[in-house]
Amino acid sequence: MEHANANPSIASVLHHSVRAGRHLALTNSKQREQAIGAMATALRGSFHDILEANTLDLEASRELGISDLLIEWLKLTPERLQRYIDLLYKLGEISSMCGNADLSSEVGDRHRYSQVKPLGTVAFIYEALPELGAIAAAMSIKTGNSIILRGGAEAQHTNLAISIALRIGLEQADFPVDAVQLVDSAPSLLYELLTRTQQVNLVIPYGRPSLIHQVTQQATVSVLPAAIGNCYLYWGANGNMELVRHAICDSHVGEPDAVNAIEKVLIHADRSSTSLTMLWKSLKERGFRLHGDRELVSSYGEYLQIAQDGEWYQPYLRKIIAFRSVQSVDEAISTIDRFSSGHADCIVTDSYLETQQFVAGVNSACVYINASPRFYRHQRGSDRVLLGMSNYHGSQRGAIGLSTLIATQQVTMG
């Protein structure tokens, strides 16, 4: 088997992807489960090759002065790699949604029902985070889709080693190996991939805002952007300080990308100075850097440094929190809707009325009430495996899971 073609044309890649997708659409859930298990086993068999490839990427990235953030995202430890191999096994065991039928009504001499089916070909555009290519590939196979992976140049050796292992697994399961293909990171190939509306059914970009912006601006195919960071928390006048501290700290726990990290906190103007300083001292002890608006910095300059205007829009993707004073829950809602990434925002309050106003008013995909928004790709005891979170303003908002990769087909029988 040819595991990888150095520079296949996009036309060739798409031709083979569409053909593989048609084969996958005819497979059953048991066959897909076996295929994903074989992919996980092949990754385990290539464990040391993948880590060696990752070492090459890390050395090259450091020499090129790649940002510390991408280095952090790129670095695979044995524990981290094993965790994602285990996740593939778990994904294989989850029940499939494809093929389920929903019988509906009879109208005259016609019988109507709906069924779920694969989208076709999915493109996953990502930077660093090489293990996410394996998760996206397994999720696509699980739902009967073929997938085209386009990683960043900083992870080229790791991505290639992972894609080779995935294709070995598919071959051993007697599945078409072209159901998973890796393409070069050249910008020209990316543009061509993003404009093939007849062959690519969905593009999921994953990475920093610059990558998301590039993909959404260039694409003519359907795009489901993933969002990381810049989540807001509103701390109401009667909210519990310990809950605020827990939500902030817990939301930043995630390896390597803390997807739902709270990076901005809106403070009701009636909060006491004692509770504010207690929170800030606690966060500083835990390694957070704290920024604030001019009003807060003028009173608490020993804890905060000025947050520039552009910071309210942008994720830090670091352990940095910016604080801003607001007069009411309505002002908090308007601030969040203006600046937040819109995929996961929180409120900490003892007021039922504030809770109802917040939920009804804020335009976020997911809202957390007196709870941490911490993101789990797979939470123990859950049957869900998630790739990420989307702030897309449409029906596919919030968690990017298996249901994101299927379509509903209406069937009418005469």
Image: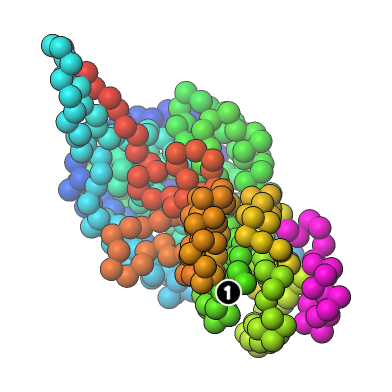
Q: Quadrant of the N terminus?
A: top left
Tell me the residue at 67%/69% (across/down).
268
In the depicted structure, whether residue 272 falls above or below residue 86:
below
Count of number-bearing discs: 1
Query: Which portion, as a residue range, is magenta?
Result: 293-312
x and y percentages locating residue 100 in the rendered image: 20, 38
Residue 300 is one of the magenta-drawn residues = yes
Tell me the residue at 64%/55% (across/down).
330
Residue 80 is one of the magenta-drawn residues = no
Is residue 192 something one can see in this rendering? yes
Q: Quadrant of the C terminus?
A: top left
x and y percentages locating residue 115 in the rendered image: 24, 32
x and y percentages locating residue 237 in the rendered image: 62, 72
Tell me the residue at 30%/40% (across/down).
144
Q: Secondary structure at mark 1?
A: loop
Drawn side of residue 58 relative to residue 2, left or right: right
x and y percentages locating residue 56 in the rendered image: 58, 65
Image color mode? rainbow
Task: Name the residue that disc number 1 marks.
Answer: 238
Tell me the residue at 52%/68% (across/down).
351
Most distant residue in the right direction: 298
Please name the amino acid that badge 1 sits on. Asn
In the depicted structure, whether residue 62 falls above or below residue 158:
below
